[in-house]
Image: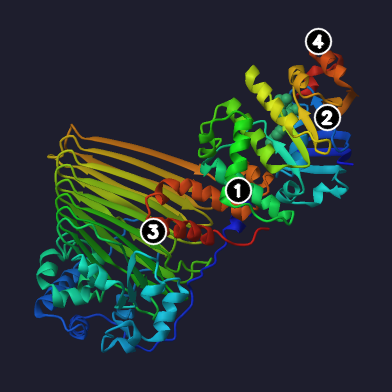
Amino acid sequence: MMLTIKDLHARVEDKIILKGLNLTVKPGEVHAIMGPNGAGKSTLGYVMSGRDGYELVSGSIEMNGEDLMEMDIEERAQQGLFLAFQYPVEIPGVSNMEFMKESVNAIRKARGEEALTAAEFLKIAKEACKQVNLPLDFLKRGVNEGFSGGEKKRNEIMQLILLKPKLVILDESDSGLDIDALKVVADGVNSQRDGKRSFIVVTHYQRLLDFIEPDYVHILADGKIVKSGGPELAKEVESTGYAWLGKPEEAGA
Amino acid sequence: MSEQIEKAIARKYDAGFVSEIESDTFPPGLDEDVIRRISEMKNEPEWMLEWRLQAFRSWLKMKEPDWAHLGYERIDYQSISYYSAPKSMKDKPKSLDEVDPELIRTYEKLGIPLHEQKMLAGVAVDAVFDSVSVVTTFRAKLEEAGVIFCPISEAIQKYPELVKKYLGSVVPRSDNFFAALNCAVFTDGSFVYIPKGVRCPMELSTYFRINELNTGQFERTLIIADEGSHVSYLEGCTAPQRDENQLHAAVVELVALDDAEIKYSTVQNWYPGDENGKGGIYNFVTKRGIAHKNSKISWTQVETGSAITWKYPSCILKGDNSVGEFYSVALTRGRQQADTGTKMIHLGKNTKSTIVSKGISAGNSSNAYRGLVKMGPGADGARNHTECDSLLIGDKCAAHTFPYIESSNPSAIVEHEATTSKVSDDQMFLCKQRGLDAEKAVSMIVNGFCKEVFKELPMEFAVEAGKLLEISLEGSVG
Ligand SMILES: Nc1ncnc2c1ncn2[C@@H]1O[C@H](COP(=O)(O)OP(=O)(O)OP(=O)(O)O)[C@@H](O)[C@H]1O
Ligand SMILES: [Mg+2]
């Protein structure tokens, strides 16, 4: 099993956000997660990746049979967990190229592979850059420094392509994208679907799922998965919203 | 996360070893006799002794400055030894073969090979050990170009006219407390003269090393770039790890005549003391250049060492169209304190200055930028641009900015930008999520912050400076 989450309870500060979440993902599967604002979707990604301040209260998360909660953030990344951020942060002065080269080599090292030379890396970086339709000078620019919202999202996908992770969480990689960029992001993601790599796609909109076809769709509300189904569930949400969940004031409270 | 960042920057000082070298060292204490003996040891002409004594007499009347944002116990100037020289240097070696091998090993350990065949291509080195210059490399090649690069003690003997004309012409003897002390007791340093129209064929560099216990190091550097000439000069500094504080009070004077250009870079890595603030170098330095017509003086500094740094490399932009630049990275950690910055004194028309200061504070350290931009009445059309950025690592450190602007010319333009940022948890999280450990993440973020300054350093040293920052930030991550 790629991912097994059992009865996950997690808190941020003093507030319990995830309240008994279960999810299993097999290799090669794509799971979409939808749900109202504040439901805990980003929190799930943060807890999985080990962000400080996001604390496990009870339950378990295993990736490829290993307990994720026992690992440091970087160890989880080295084991193949990748999170594409909802709000990518800037690192001024550190070139995208340098950042990604260090990342790729840190992960290669953890896998016992040799570091790529500057020339080798440059070659694959250029390809990835073209693939997400960013001009090559984005490799030289500071990480996310002055990038537009859409460019930041495409930059995340470029990192995904370069890092070759096993399990990918895309946190609203479609928000703020124009329709062409949406296609670029979706194509980028689809190019990484190889039957083994698994994806958790967090989104509010059906239109992304037109391009990245999910195997399953889950509705996350108030810290739990309240409904699961096939792609048709996303279409249902698109037309009816979340009113059927009831008590909307509590969902985001 | 901040705790982890702090652990990631625990200290480690690679240059902290002590060399076993026999030395002639004066007993601690300072009076006119000591100065006479220094002058005698150096076989100096009468005028030089007189110059020193006058400086000493004015020093006696001066008060140690206390306006800087620094806290330290007052220095007992009578407890310091003012002269120390390796014994084997007594009859000055004629060539490297005659230099004590232990000395050469010391420099090799520091990564500064003095054998020319092993040297970085294209860099001439003057090595100053405690109070004396040990060796200057590539002299023949420089002489061919007419460039003089030698210990200042030698210049006093060989080129008295140049020394008399320029020594003290930029930093007057009574300029400030530490400069006056330096004038009285300086023992060695480097002297550079670039003749008219000559582009110095290689980088010049001086490595300073304090070895002896309880010795002060008071070096003196004088660089004269004659009309239309060009030189790039770099100094590096290290000292052993000792529990006692040691005093370093240098004076550097730069003279850029019409159309000349001097680029002066410093990588300062004196021993900073331990994490509780025990030991370390007190670095009280006066650096100043005078820029004549159409000339340019550029200071670049990377300051990572010293318990206390008090240093304001300055430019007097006297000639019309002259240019002054100051690029600085100052990193403080543990209990280090730095009060550093620059003064840009615009006197000529259309003079321009640029100040880029990057202060990085970590641990319990304190890092202050202090800068003065002065526009004289004759500075028509003069411009200054100052950018002053502070980066905080953790939340026990402090950054301060003290910009002073004095303008007596309405046509002059002064711009000042300042920012303070933190190595944020978000940035650390992004780096780690991409597989990087905390140390690598911090050093990458800090290096990125310093990029604008590093690109001003000569190539070889930019790499060195980046590594130095990385080592300075190295430690265990919990
Ligand atoms: N650091 C924090 N301190 C306090 N509350 C927090 C913190 N981080 C998240 N929360 C709260 O946790 C809840 C879940 O947030 P989360 O970001 O996971 O929602 P989401 O489902 O991703 O929403 P959106 O669709 O708007 O992105 C929200 O109510 C949010 O305010
Ligand atoms: Mg979210």
For the residues beneath circles 4 and 3, the answer to whether they share a chain is: no
How far apart are the alpha carbons under marks 2 and 4?
20 Å
- Split into quadrants, the picture shows ligand 2 in the one at top right
Does the beta carbon of the residue at mark 4 sit less than 8 Å from ligand 1?
A: no
Secondary structure state at the residue bearing disc 4: helix
Kind of residue at disc 1:
Glu
Percent from the top left, x then y, of residue B348?
A: 14, 43
How far apart are the alpha carbons under marks 1 and 2?
34 Å
How far apart are the alpha carbons under marks 4 and 3?
66 Å
Kind of residue at disc 4:
Ser
For the residues beneath circles 4 and 1, the answer to whether they share a chain is: yes
- Mark 3 sits on what residue? B70
Q: Residue at x 26, y 72 (%)?
A: B139
Secondary structure state at the residue bearing disc 3: loop
Circle count: 4
Relative to the observer, which residue lies in front, B198 or A226? Answer: B198
Indicate whether A132 appears above or below B76: above
- Mark 2 sits on what residue? A31
Q: For marks 4 and 1, give the one nearer the viewer.
A: 1
- Mark 1 sits on what residue? A120
Secondary structure state at the residue bearing disc 1: helix
Q: Is residue A253 left or right of residue A64?
A: left
Q: Is there CB contact under 8 Å for labels 4 and 3?
A: no
Judge whether residue B415 can be spotted in this image: yes
Kind of residue at disc 2:
His
Q: Given the image, what chain letter belongs to the residue carrying mark 4?
A: A
Indicate whether B30 appears above or below B288: below
Kind of residue at disc 3:
Leu
Q: For marks 3 and 2, give the one nearer the viewer.
A: 2
